[in-house]
Amino acid sequence: MKLSDVQKRLQAPFPVKEVNWKPASFTRDRSRALLLAHIDARAVQDRLDAVCPDAWSFEMEVVSAAGRPTIKGRLTVLGVVREDIGEALEGDLGTFKAAASDALKRCAVQFGIGRYLYDLPKTWAEWDDAKRAPTQTPELPQWARPDHERSPGGAHLISAIDQLKYELPDDLELQRELYKHLKAALGSLHPAGKAA
């Protein structure tokens, strides 16, 4: 397997629930904030595990321990290496863990993971300074959503399937029967092999 074989899967949009928002700047009265969309390091790891579980690694090197912790990250995916620097925030959140997460995410962007988030339009939103969060989560445009969340009811269906994982019967034969019916139902919605 080569990197070009999995590039589209690495670059695919993340589910809306995995996209977080952080403020980049505020109005003078801090009632509104310019929000930036981002994913966390765990989402990056999950994506790499899903696409090429045995063919990626991440190494770190401390660049600076004084002031803001800074880490040089080295992400290898299917033998291809990308490097970048990660910095921690100032203050109490300025940990090496935060710098390492930042380095991983920056390296991952060089492979296309989450890069589409940089193409989002500027998003200003009402800001609750006491809660340090937007009063309402911004909506992602359709193009920045995975395919299953672009269709009406798609997000609800995925949520229901996620919940179903915890409600599966213990009996293996019943699980197989359920799988067979789900596969048949999905096949009827989007038959494989039909000419477009």
Image (cartoon, rainbow, N blue to C red):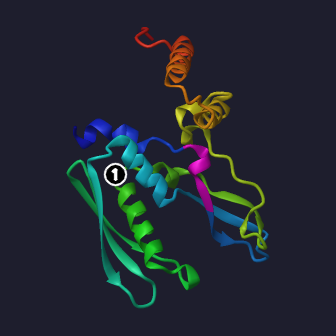
Residue drawn at x 57%, y 85% is 91
x and y percentages locating residue 137 in the rendered image: 71, 53
Residue farthest top in this picture:
195
Residue at numbered disc 1 = 111
Tally the marks: 1
Residue farthest front in this picture:
171
x and y percentages locating residue 99 in the rendered image: 43, 74
Amino acid identity at mark 1 = Phe
- In this view, the residue in front, 117 or 81, is 81
The image quadrant that residue 15 belongs to is top right
The image quadrant that residue 126 belongs to is bottom right
Q: Is residue 170 above or below residue 3?
A: above
Q: Quadrant of the C terminus?
A: top left
Q: Is residue 66 above or below residue 182?
A: below
Mark 1, Cα crowd under 10 Å, few <14 / some 14-19 / many 20+, is many
As helix, strand or loop, the secondary structure at mark 1 comes to loop
x and y percentages locating residue 62 in the rendered image: 32, 80
Queried whether the magenta region covers residue 121, the answer comes back as no
Q: Quadrant of the N terminus?
A: top left
Residue drawn at x 64%, y 37% is 163
Q: Is residue 184 above or below residue 14?
A: above
Residue drawn at x 44%, y 67% is 102
Residue range highlighted in magenta: 15-21
x and y percentages locating residue 125 in the rendered image: 73, 59
Residue drawn at x 26%, y 48% is 55
Residue farthest left in this picture:
79
